[in-house]
């Protein structure tokens, strides 16, 4: 039962941090941040994303490749290549979609 309490507290702490971090948007609506603060926030978020991608994606892939006797560059390089192809495909598809006609249809239905 104690582990359920720890999980609940951890989940609520995670929720609270996410809610607080996202609530900064409401402040930005009324008083825009100076450019140097935005650059700092972008730098912090880029560092967090790099750390998350390494510890949550690349490190497990490297460990799994060692267990499977596969060269370590295969899962990491394959993941990067597939991710790049997905971004290119999404860019190709989204560039050719006509969102203005969708907006006109939505507004005409009202």
Image: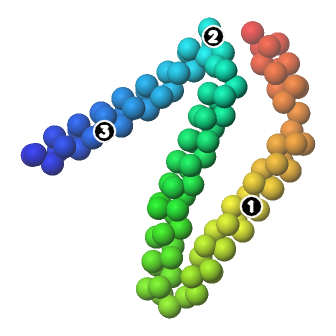
- x and y percentages locating residue 31 in the rendered image: 63, 10
Q: Are marks 2 and 1 in contact (CB under 8 Å)?
A: no
Q: Mark 2, mark 1: which one is toward the viewer?
A: 2
- x and y percentages locating residue 92 in the rendered image: 86, 50
User: In this view, which residue lies farthest toward the front?
Assistant: 36
Residue visible at 56% across and 41% down in the picture = 44
User: Distance between the Cα atoms at labels 2 and 1?
Assistant: 37 Å
The residue wearing badge 2 is 31
User: Which sits earlier in the primary sequence, circle 2 or circle 3?
Assistant: 3
Q: How many marks?
A: 3
- x and y percentages locating residue 70 in the rendered image: 55, 88
Residue visible at 85% across and 19% down in the picture = 104
Residue visible at 47% across and 60% down in the picture = 56
- x and y percentages locating residue 6 in the rendered image: 19, 43
User: Distance between the Cα atoms at labels 2 and 3?
Assistant: 31 Å
The residue wearing badge 1 is 84
The residue wearing badge 3 is 11
- Taking 26 as reference, is 91 above or below it? below
């Amino acid at each position: 039962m104690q582990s359920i309490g720890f999980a609940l507290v951890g989940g609520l702490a995670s929720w609270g941090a996410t809610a607080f971090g996202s609530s900064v948007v409401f402040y930005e609506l009324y008083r825009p941040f100076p450019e140097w603060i935005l650059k700092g926030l972008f730098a912090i978020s880029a560092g967090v994303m790099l750390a998350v991608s390494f510890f949550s994606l690349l490190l497990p892939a490297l460990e799994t490749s060692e267990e499977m006797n596969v060269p370590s560059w295969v899962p990491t390089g394959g993941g990067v290549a597939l991710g790049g192809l997905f971004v290119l495909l999404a860019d190709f598809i989204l560039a050719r979609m006509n969102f203005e006609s969708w907006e006109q249809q939505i507004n005409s239905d009202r």
